[in-house]
Image (cartoon, rainbow, N blue to C red):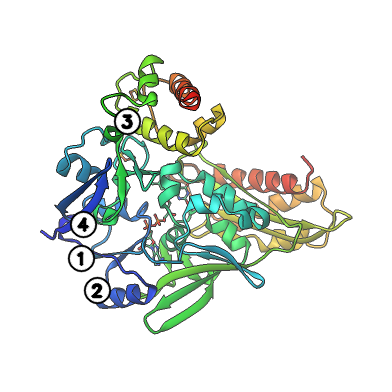
């Protein structure tokens, strides 16, 4: 089996992994780095459950190869909380009841985090647009949009 | 199979061409088509050549009368390009329809062109623009019209050791309007069932100075509608004329039945989209 050494920054920490370059980032995170928050849904870019930030941009980890992230920076859902405190998005998802089975939640939150980073005061239309690539089979999205709106209001006040 | 793979990461076009020639490997840009194909075992390769770190191949710029889009420009950068917004807004419309933002951040225009799907959404607009593609190998480059490049579903004129470096087209005259419309099962995240790119330039008296119509997903490759364009050219734009032209475009396609729609639905779709596009650009609706 061909492997290569992949050096990357994950959630602020330098990591070095020996892995086959054709493995997807999704499995690099889940199998080699024990980060199970990034979910394995469709494996073809349709559902967004595997959304992570690559150099700050939301991407589907199932459609990025491990070899392509050498020297780059990845943030997963595990990287959002700080000093044991949930990120406002995480808290508001819970408070608004935007989580049912929870499978889509990490992906939705990562896409939302990228949105708030670029646009701290999004309109509902902008929130919907940012989340087009994230499917949820349970909630019907209304509570999700509410949660993002509430988190934006809180982040903006700080 | 994936575990036997090597990944090469060239840092220049020349290096990429050399590796391609030496290894006969499979090129990967954004990977949004290649990675699912690889998983399905749809190609055999021992080497993947990752273009994502080639400098300067992702720029969108003006060169004299031409607009040049680097093969590695992704949908997000197309959506954010001021130059394209001002000159060919239909390309921004296309870019905004491809998957979610995750896919738009990865998928490239060059990958869409080389993938040559009958439903590839950048293709009708680029055909309407009479775009050319620039192909490089380790010995040099050649430029050919996109209409010659596309040869069939998934088939192109690219030679085994060539890379696509740029897509170029003449900047449309000031005042040219353009739009891209498609029918799919839902609004986002779908493969087009029928799509239409229309471009229109009117003079002060509503006379058509220039018109281009291209269709996607209704033939083995996206097509232009020369008869309908000829009918419209030089005429004063009216709803009746649009109706006649839209009717004519139906004959340009040779749609098939598949899981996404029937041939009859597609024929109807062609007419609807062409009519809607021309009415919108002509300010008649
Ligand atoms: C969820 C989802 C939704 C999508 N929605 C749409 C849609 O609405 N409309 C649409 O048209 N497409 C859609 N697509 C497909 C679209 O993302 C691709 O066609 C994309 O543009 C391909 O670009 P890429 O950089 O990802 O190509 P890759 O997957 O990297 O490559 C595609 C092909 O082109 C070759 N290649 C790539 N770049 C070059 C180059 N510079 N020189 C030579 N060969 C090259 C590769 O070898 C491969 O054969 C969707 C994909 C996903 C995952
Ligand atoms: S698992 Fe990656 S998009 Fe569905
Ligand atoms: S909460 Fe179940 S899929 Fe979204």
Judging by the rendered image, the residue that carries numbered circle 1 is: B46
- The reply, left or right, for residue B87 in relation to residue B94 is right
Residue under the point 46% across and 33% down:
A116
Residues at marks 3 and 2 touching, judged by CB atoms closer than 8 Å: no
Relative depth, front residue between B166 and B202: B166
C-alpha distance separating marks 3 and 2: 39 Å
Dot 2, crowdedness within 10 Å: few (<14), some or many (≥20)? some
Among the 4 quarters of the image, the one containing residue A81:
top left
> Are the residues at dot 1 and dot 2 in contact (C-beta closer than 8 Å)?
yes
**Cα–Cα gap, marks 3 and 1:** 34 Å
Q: Chain of mark 4?
A: A
Residue A139 occupies which quadrant of the picture? top left
Q: Secondary structure at mark 2?
A: helix
Q: Nearer the viewer, mark 4 or mark 2?
A: 4
Which of the two marks, 3 or 1, is nearer to us in this view? 3
Residue B103 locus on image (x, y percent): 42, 46
Q: Earlier in the sequence, mark 1 or mark 2?
A: 2
- The residue that appears at 41% across and 34% down in the rendered structure is A113
Circle 3 packing at 10 Å, graded few (<14), some (14-19), many (20+), is many
Query: What distance separates the C-alpha of mark 4 from that of mark 2?
Result: 16 Å
- Residue A136: tell me if it is visible: yes
Q: Are marks 1 and 4 on the same chain?
A: no
Q: On the image, numbered disc 4 is attached to which residue? A: A21
- Are the residues under marks 1 and 2 on the same chain? yes
Please give the residue where the numbered disc 2 appears in the rendered image.
B23
Q: Which residue is mark 3?
A: A106
């Amino acid at each position: 089996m061909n492997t290569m050494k992949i050096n990357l920054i994950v959630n602020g920490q330098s990591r070095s992994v020996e892995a086959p370059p054709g493995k997807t980032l999704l499995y690099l995170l889940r199998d080699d780095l024990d980060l199970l928050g990034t979910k394995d849904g469709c494996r073809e870019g349709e559902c967004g459950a595997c959304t992570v930030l690559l150099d700050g941009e939301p991407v589907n980890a199932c459609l990025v190869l491990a070899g392509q992230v050498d020297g780059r920076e990845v943030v997963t859902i595990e990287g959002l909380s700080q000093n044991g405190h949930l990120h406002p998005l995480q808290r508001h998802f819970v408070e608004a009841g935007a989580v049912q089975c929870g499978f889509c939640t990490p992906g939705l939150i990562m896409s939302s985090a990228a949105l708030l980073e670029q646009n701290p005061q999004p309109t509902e239309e902008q929130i919907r647009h940012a989340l087009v690539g994230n499917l949820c089979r349970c909630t019907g999205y209304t509570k999700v949009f509410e949660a993002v709106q509430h988190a934006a209001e809180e982040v903006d006040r700080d | 199979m994936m575990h036997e793979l090597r990944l090469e990461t060239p840092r220049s076009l020349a290096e990429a061409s050399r590796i391609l020639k030496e290894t006969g490997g499979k090129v990967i840009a954004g990977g949004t088509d290649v990675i699912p194909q690889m998983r399905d075992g749809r190609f055999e390769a021992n080497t993947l050549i990752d273009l994502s770190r080639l400098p300067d191949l992702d720029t969108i710029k003006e060169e004299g009368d031409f607009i040049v889009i680097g093969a590695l420009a992704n949908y997000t950068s197309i959506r954010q390009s001021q130059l394209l917004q001002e000159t060919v807004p239909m390309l921004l419309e296309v870019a905004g329809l491809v998957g979610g933002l995750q896919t738009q951040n990865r998928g490239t225009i060059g990958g869409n062109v080389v993938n040559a799907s009958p439903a590839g959404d950048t293709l009708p607009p680029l055909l309407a623009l009479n775009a050319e593609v620039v192909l490089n190998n380790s010995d040099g480059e050649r430029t050919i019209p996109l209409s010659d490049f596309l040869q069939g579903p998934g088939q192109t004129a690219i030679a085994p050791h060539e890379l696509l470096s740029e897509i170029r087209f003449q900047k449309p005259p000031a005042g040219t309007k353009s739009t891209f419309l498609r029918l799919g099962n839902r609004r986002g995240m779908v493969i087009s069932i029928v799509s239409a790119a229309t471009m229109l330039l009117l003079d002060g008296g509503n006379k058509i100075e220039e018109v281009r119509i291209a269709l996607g997903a209704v033939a083995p490759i996206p097509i232009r509608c020369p008869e309908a364009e000829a009918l419209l050219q030089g005429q004063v734009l009216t709803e009746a004329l649009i109706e006649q032209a839209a009717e004519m475009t139906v004959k340009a396609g040779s749609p098939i039945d598949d899981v996404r729609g029937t041939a009859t639905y597609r024929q109807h779709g062609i007419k609807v989209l062409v009519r809607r596009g021309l009415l919108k650009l002509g300010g008649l609706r």
